Amino acid sequence: MEVESKTVMTRVDCMHLVQERQPEKDFDENGGLRAVHDGDEGEKEDGSNVVLLPLPADDHRISKDYACDDMKVGSRASNPLEQLAVQTKEQGKIKQEKKLSRRDRMELGRLFQEAVSSHDWELAESLVLLADSQTLNDVLCIALDAIWFLTTWGELNGITGLIKKIVSYGRSDFTRAILRTSFFASCVYACHCRIMNLTDTVGIMAQRLHERLQECHGDEVLKAEAGMKVQKFTDWALKCIGFHFRYQENRGGRKNNMIVEVQLQLSAFKTFLELAGDHLTGKDFTEAFDAACFPLTLFSSSFDSGWALGISAIAVQGLLGMLVEGGADNVNQCFLEASRFGSTELVRILLQIAERNSLDIDVDLALVFASHYCKIGTMECLVDEGHAVDFLGPLVRASERGCMQVVQWFVNRGCGDMELCLALTAATSSSQVGVSAYLLPHIPQHVLAALSIEILKAAGERSRGSLDGVAFLLCSDFLGDPAATYAVADSIARSNDEAVAPELRAFLLEQWSEAAFAEGLSSGQDHFVNFMRILRRGCSPICLMDLPPPLAATIAYMPLYRECMEAGGQLLSQKLRGQLVEAARRIGGRWVDDDSQANELLEILELNLPRFFLQPLTTL
């Protein structure tokens, strides 16, 4: 069938029309359009560089009258231009057409975006006829972006019909289309419940994206480039969404309630999946699922809390549900990542999707991730709704790191005695004395007594060069009985068990054993003898023998008194206590039992030292 050139606008004429229209445009900072001065006239294969822009709210609708010789391009079934497209398709020439330049592709994409945004389906279909194979993929993505703003059945019929025509006119890149629209859809639904402004949201996105890339292995340059591309696309997506919301308001707002709108949007997406058919593989659906979860994971703190219980959650569940039905198999991976970033609402949605589709997800491992990054809200969701029950691992790790908030949360939720003992061991080995002090009162004394030796041995074995945690337990009289606490320390110090770390044995033998107490007594006696020699034989012009007894005692024992005060705790080390016992005997002038404890001994010193030298016994 031939078509007379007098009646039909040729492809060349239409391309002249495209080139003569407005200059290329891009978004300004407010989401409007601004001119772009791009000197690159050459062709470019990467369709991702096409500027995909909506029609400004204050712009007039593009006229449908693009006729040559009084012929309208946008007419329906009897349109000669459509007949020409059918003819060229039948002849197999459409694939051999010359590719459009980058500038032409960008301008055609802009015109198509304006037509779609204004719901001028006839014009949009006419512009599709001008597209080469690469531009067809671009306009398919533009059309898919528009489905997430549908509000009426008429709009649904218009956009689905347009998508069907685009697919029928040439081979489409369905993989690119589903990845892009899945990411974009999540941004749209998340922005329904955004509580931060655009600038803050973009800032949070950049920070979270940087954190995520830092945890990935690979070339730093490639990671930086990937981060820049994702951030640029997300920035564009958020601006585009802001425009669409304003455009809807300028057209009179929504015409249906949001539930109906979500049904329309998901119906359009389902139509696209049906058109794609076998062209989409399980890998495509898996990557699309990750793309959909990505913004919800990274931007969770910019959303209104509880949004997963509203309409947006229904939409996201529907979107992710269709991707799972298509073959996405990374629900657990996305679930763990959402837990790591504290995206509680997405965690809740993925829990529901997993239950609905009988999928296995590791809630206990997710609890480990959430607790490691101190995401308390996510932890509550995993326990209350995900039924996570394994507290031991995350509790021990939190104790090792000294994360008091997480430790308190687990203790308040209810932990067994063995779990608390293991957490105490972890905190002691890492010298997290604050956590150890918090855990001690929550462990029954009979449990501590039974496991005391094992706790100290394990803490010493896992210590990282510091035994401050072990010293804290002993100084705190963790068994509630000084004799028992000293006996445990002495037992380990004298033990021949190879499981006892050499550093721990040496520390206890030097400071906390019975031998250390005897050494302290001997050291105290030597100190007294030396001091008396100085008094009697010294040649100091101060004449120490003539000083009042309290001042002489101060010179002799004030350093020991201050050392005991600085040690703090309820118990002193055996070595220090031995010195203090000898000092109390000498300065008090009476016998003091070997089992006397710090408070009693220090009181004897204080009675014989000038008060203006003393410190209050608040820590003992």
Image (cartoon, rainbow, N blue to C red):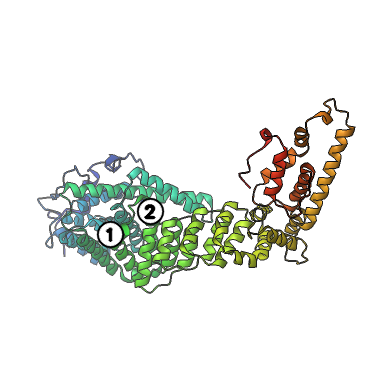
Identify which residue, 521 or 488, lies in the foreground.
521
State whether residue 91 appears in this view. Answer: no
Q: Position of residue 67 (x, y in %)?
A: 13, 50
Q: Which image quarter: residue 563?
A: top right
Q: Is residue 345 left or right of residue 583?
A: left
- Pick out the residue farthest to the front: 590
Q: Position of residue 108 (x, y in %)?
A: 26, 50
What residue did someone put label 2 on?
300
Q: What's the amino acid at mark 2?
A: Ser
Residue at 52% x, 62% y is: 394
| Dot placed on the residue nearer the N-terminal end, 2 or 1 | 2
Q: Position of residue 76 (x, y in %)?
A: 13, 60
Residue at 68% x, 59% y is: 485
- Pick out the residue farthest to the bottom: 358
State whether residue 501 appears in this view. Answer: yes
Identify which residue, 618 or 58, lies in the foreground.
618
Determine crowd level at label 2: few under 14, some 14-19, many 20+ residues with C-alpha closer than 10 A: many
What residue did someone put label 1 on?
310
Residue at 28% x, 39% y is: 34
